[in-house]
Amino acid sequence: MKEIRNRARQLILATIVFTASGCGTIFTLNDGGKPKEIPYIYSGVATEKELLSASFNTEYRLPWWALTFIVIDLPLSAAGDTLCLPFTATRAIIESKKQESNKAPGSTR
């Protein structure tokens, strides 16, 4: 019976880890999901860093289990962000060029 409980706990933990893997990356790659102050490159890691910082520096405190998920998800988001780097770097360059052309109204770009 004890072995069944241990297997059930392992299965639940594995399910949580795999369903939460790279959540920061997936969230920020959706259109409209990324706040403007978060960069495109490594946006998942930056989002989770902001969540952790806000939790410790403001009145808004995340529960311990949410912090645990963020800490577990951080390296997974880093891996996801690295895999998405060609896409996010291209997107960041395009956005930068758009901002430059919007700043200079008389530019020909």
Image (spheres, rainbow, N blue to C red):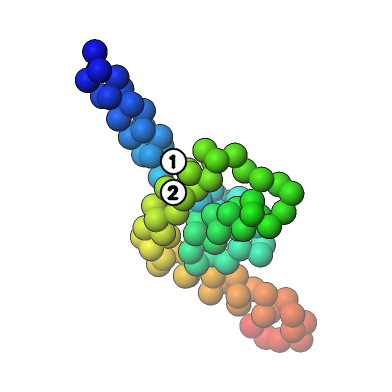
Which residue of the protein is positioned furthest toward the bottom in this rendering? 107
Residue 39: image quadrant is bottom right
Q: Quadrant of residue 81?
A: bottom left
From the top left corner, tell me how far across and down residue 73 is, in percent.
Answer: 44, 49
On-image quarter of the N terminus? top left
Q: Which amino acid type is shown beneath numbered disc 2?
A: Asp
Front one among 99 and 85: 85
- Which residue bears the numbered disc 1? 20
| Mark earlier in primary sequence (1, 2) | 1
* Residue beneath disc 2: 73
Q: Position of residue 84 (x, y in %)?
A: 41, 60
27 left or right of 22? right
Residue drawn at 25 percent across, 18 percent down:
2
Q: Is residue 85 visible?
A: yes
Spatial CA distance of label 1 from label 2 is 6 Å
Instruction: Name which residue type carries label 1.
Output: Ala
> Label 1: few (<14), some or many (≥20) within 10 Å?
some
Drawn side of residue 42 relative to residue 100, left or right:
left
The residue under the point 74% across, 80% down is 103
Q: Are marks 1 and 2 in contact (CB under 8 Å)?
A: yes
Q: Which quadrant: the C terminus?
A: bottom right
